[in-house]
Image (cartoon, rainbow, N blue to C red):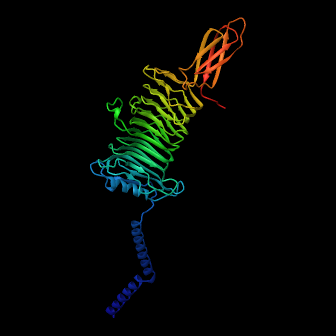
Amino acid sequence: MGASTTAMILLFAAAVHVYGYNRPDEFSRKRDHLHRMQGILERRSLQQQAPRSPSGPVVYHVTDYGADPTGRNDSTDAVLKAISDALNGPGRGVLFEGIVNLGGARVDLDGGNYLISRPLLFPVSGRGNLAIHGGSLTASYNFPNDGYLLDLSSPSNSTYNYEFITLRDLLLDSNYRGGGISVTNSLRTTIDNCYVTRFNTTGILVQGGHETYIRTSYLGQHVTAGGDSGERSFSGTAIALAGNDNTVSDVVIFSAQTGILVTGQANLISGVHCYNKAAGFGGVGIHLRLPGLTQTRIVDSYMDYTGIVAEDPVQLTVANTFFLGDAFILFKSVKGVMSGVNVVDNMFAGGDRGIEIVQLEGNFGEVDQVAVDRNAVKGMAVKTTVARASVEGEGPSWTADLGAALIFPNLIKQVQYTFISDAASFPRHFVRNVSDNKVVIQSDVAVPARVYVTADQGGTYL
């Protein structure tokens, strides 16, 4: 019985052990655990297949796409793929109507120099809040002559193509084939700390849209620091503003036929240093080519041997600007209109060659609210709309000839004068004649007198 009893006890214990391990609640827990693990693995697989919306900034490194930072191999496709992925990246709401907010995504050029064989034309429009920065782009020898290295001009049915696109810390070398940057029908674009060179068309072209800010940048067709032996052959335009409400500030233009060409309204140019092709060689620092409605302000700038040309200027201000090397302002008549023009508080310095600080080309038949005054001039001929003279002698007639100083021929709209005489009797006196920019003061009797005359060509200020 002892052995048999022992076997039965062991068998019973084993049965109890097996029954305890396979209780229904234990099976349920293991089954639930396996199902949870399977679900986690399935979700991870789906997340790996679908794009995720990251919680932080999205940075697209062009070198991750195979771009060659040494500039030896063509990187066009790689850089374009990085830009395309950025434009197609996750959105965070909208900016202007129809513009997807990319949330501050960045295309990083990783400090490399990339060879580009065709324009980096943005493939998707209706995007905003994106930056491209930190490197150099160089056009290859087969780059198209009419292309731009960076081209924000994708066709779109929306009001604007792009909004709040930032291009900064870039060097763009067009290799004398095409231009640098083209911005078309875009809103609030910033071009900051860029160096654009070796263009044969236009360094930066802005068409349509508005509020493009170009600042703290350098542009030149040829890399020079002035006194270039090939200056006479400079061509192209550094900046073309063919849109409204744009600003160019703290920019240096060191070579080109034309520094800034303005064909849009309400633009501001400030802190700009133009020493592109000299006026004596046919160059123009700033050309305002929108006759009849200029609406441009040029302030706190430096025109270095190259001047300003304005066609039929209407609402134009040039103030606190330095003109060096006989640089001057030329007003060109298209329909003979000039109105609301202020050229005040500037400095002009020349080589004592008699060059006038303000010049006219053609006839202006409609002149109103024009003030050219309070300019500091050295070594050039003063021209103004408000001229002053004094004439002393024995009357009865005193003639003040103001033709040398006044800008417009045979145009005086207002006259003020002061008559001072030590004669015992004070005569009656009056303005006798105003013609050919001469003012004749006459008295009813001949007396010794000094007459001070101020003549204004500017027109009425109500």
Looking at the image, residue 370 lies above or below residue 57: above
Which x, y percent locates residue 186? 49, 50
Looking at the image, residue 15 lies above or below residue 121: below
Side (left or right) of 155 relative to 340 = left
Question: Which quarter of the figure is the N terminus placed in?
Answer: bottom left
Residue furthest top in the image: 424
Given residues 34 and 267, the one toward you in this image is: 267
Seen at 36% across and 51% down, the residue is 119
Which x, y percent locates residue 252? 42, 35
Given residues 112 and 120, the one toward you in this image is: 120
Given residues 190 and 52, the one toward you in this image is: 190
Seen at 35% across and 49% down, the residue is 110
Given residues 264 and 399, the one toward you in this image is: 399
Residue furthest left in the image: 72
Which x, y percent locates residue 341? 56, 32
Seen at 53% across and 43% down, the residue is 245
Side (left or right) of 131 relative to 428 = left
Q: Can residue 36 be seen in this view?
A: yes
Q: Quadrant of residue 24?
A: bottom left
Which x, y percent locates residue 216? 44, 38
Number of numbered callouts drawn: 0
Side (left or right) of 449 relative to 160 = right
Q: Can residue 64 be seen in this view?
A: no
Question: Which quarter of the figure is the C terminus placed in?
Answer: top right
Seen at 34% across and 41% down, the residue is 198
